[in-house]
């Protein structure tokens, strides 16, 4: 088996921030670095497509770090790299809960310094791989203009191959099984396929947002008599509010929303805060990303990162961030009207809050091309079902089955009824809301804080003693889930102290191998916790990327968090099975968002939402006994389900 290590250094007038696929359309290959196995690293300047293709064709395996970039650039430069041949060290790292950046991996894995990514590389990339600053006479640096730096650039390219080889050898292979590899290959095809974009809507919405932003700024300037010149001036806004008697510590969305609900808020403060709230919408950035990132054929590609959520292996969103789209503020029929109004440039006549319209219409930018339709289906309450199944809470799994069969009770009514010994038929609307908050907040060992936060999102305010009673009642009704938390923490802690031994909890198992703690999932995949440690107080921690700081540091964990990881990871594996089944049956997946599949199919009766839902609700062999259901809709413009 001949293994080729390959890496490119490229130039493009298009910023890489616009996405790999848009960048690659204008790309030029400056350097090709490669090596056969452990052999000498060779760097070729300005290689031809013929030279590169010969290397690719002669290899059985091609190792690339972040292969989606190199493969896409090569395709746009007339080189075909079969994805089936590729081993991606970035994906190998992400699949084992490590960050993807090559330099950071070298540090974490303690790759010798002479094999670490050259820190001068960033300076050289800034010099050669993008246009120079517009205020400079020289628009582009080359070998001829900067011969000394070019020689350093060649050395840097060679170091990347050295680093890649060392990282590949140091990384585990537990999650690089055939099933996962096949899924990654399919993921690459889905990313390459992309999704069609309504560019007219994106342009119209961005125009509308810019116009209303300008007006909001003018209104704020006028109402504050020049004290605040823009809705983005945080400190001046705070100072103005305090000067008129409104004491406020910050201008976070929750703080502003709470102030706007107050009847005691002065009218002038209300106007300032309402303008700021409108202007704070993130939807204009989404539309700008669409316009910048769309390929020349009108499709947006590369929005999904395989194993991008490192703890669970779920997909991460990239560029357009489809996993982080705003919830609509207005009804579907109003969104449709608003889209037409924005395209006609009359949205400000028909809508009082244009920013809400823009945010509500973002999903509608994703469309089916002529002759096609979108079939969308979502796994129903997959985390609740998965948690019950993993923990062995059999009464709840049976309740889901009965509900799916049309003879059972609503799960939120049942949660409340089971907690307080009521007949589900007697659960009121308000009690059902409490049951919903119980289900959303308490499954992963949440208590007072988790319930209070979730309750506030649903407009529920309760005294602490009432909340504690609700929490206790839910836990009493779910004894196996409760045991699953503590069993998981105990099993993980025992595994850390007894390397090589297996400790089970529910349907998962823990084992320590060297500097790794592994959680074995029913699917055969592993969740990985690098460098686990149990302190003298019995508290478990491991090393990972902090959710907020994005730095590599020691992270504490506990039973409920481990259960959350397991539940979300297994839900991901169910979705992955659905993706494979959908593709094999002709439902071309163009995107998936959380537990929802969006497929682009011919606009005819042969593909429908019932067919897709049945495919998604048919689980793999390992999930026997897990109640699954899916439902959705068909459309020509993507939307939130009614």
Image (tube, rainbow, N blue to C red):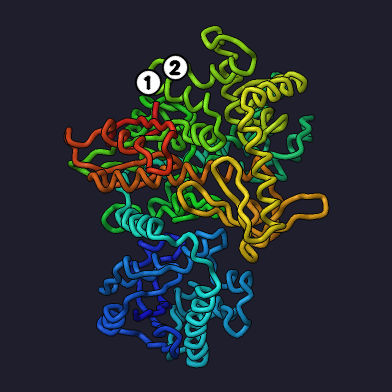
Position of residue 324 relative to residue 460, above or below, is below
- Asked if marks 1 and 2 touch (Cβ < 8 Å), the reply is yes
Residue 609 occupies which quadrant of the picture?
A: top left
* Residue at image mark 2: 408
The reply to whether residue 345 is visible in this rendering is no
The label on residue 187 is none
**In the image: residue 611, left or right of residue 416:** left
Pick the residue in front: 264 or 479. Answer: 479
Residue 59 occupies which quadrant of the picture?
A: bottom left
The reply to whether residue 195 is visible in this rendering is yes
Q: Where does residue 147 sit, x and y in percent of width and height?
A: 48, 92
Judged from this view, the residue extending furthest toward the front is 501
Residue lying at 44% horizontally and 56% vertically, measured from the top left: 306
Label 1 sits on a secondary structure element that is loop
- Neighbor class of circle 2 (other Cα within 10 Å; few <14, some 14-19, many 20+) is some
**In the image: residue 388, left or right of residue 640:** right
Judged from this view, the residue extending furthest toward the top is 426
* Residue at image mark 1: 405
Q: Where does residue 182 sit, x and y in percent of width and height?
A: 35, 58
Position of residue 409 relative to residue 101, above or below, is above
Label 2 sits on a secondary structure element that is loop
Residue lying at 61% horizontally and 41% vertically, measured from the top left: 231
- Neighbor class of circle 1 (other Cα within 10 Å; few <14, some 14-19, many 20+) is few
**In the image: residue 12, left or right of residue 50:** right
State how far apart marks 1 and 2 are (Cα).
7 Å
Q: Quadrant of the C terminus?
A: top left
Q: Where does residue 569 sit, x and y in percent of width and height?
A: 51, 46
Judged from this view, the residue extending furthest toward the right is 536
Residue lying at 68% horizontally and 21% vertically, measured from the top left: 473
Q: Quadrant of the N terminus?
A: bottom left
Pick the residue in front: 476 or 609. Answer: 476
Residue lying at 76% horizontally and 38% vertically, measured from the top left: 249
């Amino acid at each position: 088996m001949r293994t080729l290590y390959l890496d490119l250094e490229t130039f493009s007038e298009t910023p890489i921030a616009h996405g790999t696929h848009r960048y690659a359309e204008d790309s030029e290959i400056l350097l090709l670095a490669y090596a056969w196995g452990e052999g000498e690293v060779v760097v070729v300047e300005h290689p031809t497509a013929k030279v590169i293709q010969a290397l690719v064709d002669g290899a059985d395996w091609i190792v690339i770090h972040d292969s989606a970039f190199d493969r896409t650039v090569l395709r746009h430069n007339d080189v075909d790299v079969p994805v089936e041949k590729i081993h991606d060290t970035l994906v190998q790292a992400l699949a084992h809960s490590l960050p993807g950046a090559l330099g950071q991996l070298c540090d974490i894995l303690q790759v010798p310094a002479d094999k670490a990514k050259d820190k001068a590389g960033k300076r050289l990339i800034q010099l050669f791989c993008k246009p120079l600053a517009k205020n400079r006479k020289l628009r582009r640096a080359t070998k001829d203009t900067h011969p000394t730096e070019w020689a350093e650039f060649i050395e840097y390219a060679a170091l990347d191959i050295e680093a890649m080889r060392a990282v590949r050898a140091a990384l585990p292979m537990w999650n690089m099984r055939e099933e996962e590899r096949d899924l990654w290959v399919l993921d690459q095809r889905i990313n390459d396929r992309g999704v069609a974009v309504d560019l007219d809507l994106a342009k119209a919405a961005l125009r509308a947002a810019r116009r209303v932003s300008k007006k909001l700024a003018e209104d704020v300037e006028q109402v504050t008599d020049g004290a605040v010149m823009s809705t983005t001036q945080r400190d001046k806004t705070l100072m103005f509010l305090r000067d008129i008697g409104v004491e406020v510590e910050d201008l976070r969305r929750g703080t502003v929303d709470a102030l706007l609900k107050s009847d005691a808020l002065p009218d002038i403060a209300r106007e300032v805060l309402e303008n700021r709230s409108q202007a704070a919408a993130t939807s204009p950035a989404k539309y700008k990303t669409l316009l910048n990132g769309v390929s020349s054929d009108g499709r947006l590609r590369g929005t999904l990162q395989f194993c991008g959520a490192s703890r669970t292996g779920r997909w991460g969103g990239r560029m357009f961030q489809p996993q982080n789209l705003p919830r609509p503020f207005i009804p579907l029929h109003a969104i449709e009207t608003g889209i037409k109004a924005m395209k006609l440039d009359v949205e400000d006549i028909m809508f009082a809050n244009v920013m809400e319209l823009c945010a509500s219409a973002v999903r509608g930018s994703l469309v089916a091309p002529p002759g096609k339709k979108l079939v969308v289906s979502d796994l129903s309450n997959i985390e609740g079902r998965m948690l019950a199944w993993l923990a062995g809470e059999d009464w709840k799994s049976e309740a889901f089955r009965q509900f799916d069969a049309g003879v059972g009770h609503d799960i939120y009514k049942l949660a409340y009824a089971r907690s307080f010994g009521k007949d589900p038929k007697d659960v009121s609307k308000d009690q059902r809301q409490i049951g919903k908050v119980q289900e959303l907040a308490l499954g992963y060992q949440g208590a007072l804080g988790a319930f209070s936060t979730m309750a506030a999102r649903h407009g529920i305010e309760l005294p602490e003693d009432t909340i504690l009673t609700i929490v206790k009642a839910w836990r009493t009704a779910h004894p196996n889930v409760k045991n699953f938390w503590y069993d998981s923490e105990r099993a993980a802690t025992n595994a850390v102290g007894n390397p090589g031994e297996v400790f089970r909890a529910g349907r998962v198992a823990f084992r320590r191998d060297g500097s790794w703690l592994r959680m074995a999932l029913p699917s055969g995949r592993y969740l990985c916790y690098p460098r686990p440690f149990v302190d003298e107080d019995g508290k478990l921690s491991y090393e990972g990327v902090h959710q907020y700081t994005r730095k590599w540091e020691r992270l504490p964990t506990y039973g409920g968090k481990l259960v959350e990881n397991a539940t979300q990871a297994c839900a991901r594996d169910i979705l992955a099975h659905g993706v494979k089944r959908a593709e094999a049956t002709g439902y071309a997946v163009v995107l998936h968002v959380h537990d929802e599949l969006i497929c682009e199919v011919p606009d005819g009766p042969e593909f429908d939402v019932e067919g897709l839902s049945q495919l998604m609700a048919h689980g793999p062999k390992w999930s026997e006994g897990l109640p699954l259901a899916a439902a959705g809709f068909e459309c020509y413009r993507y939307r939130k389900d009614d």
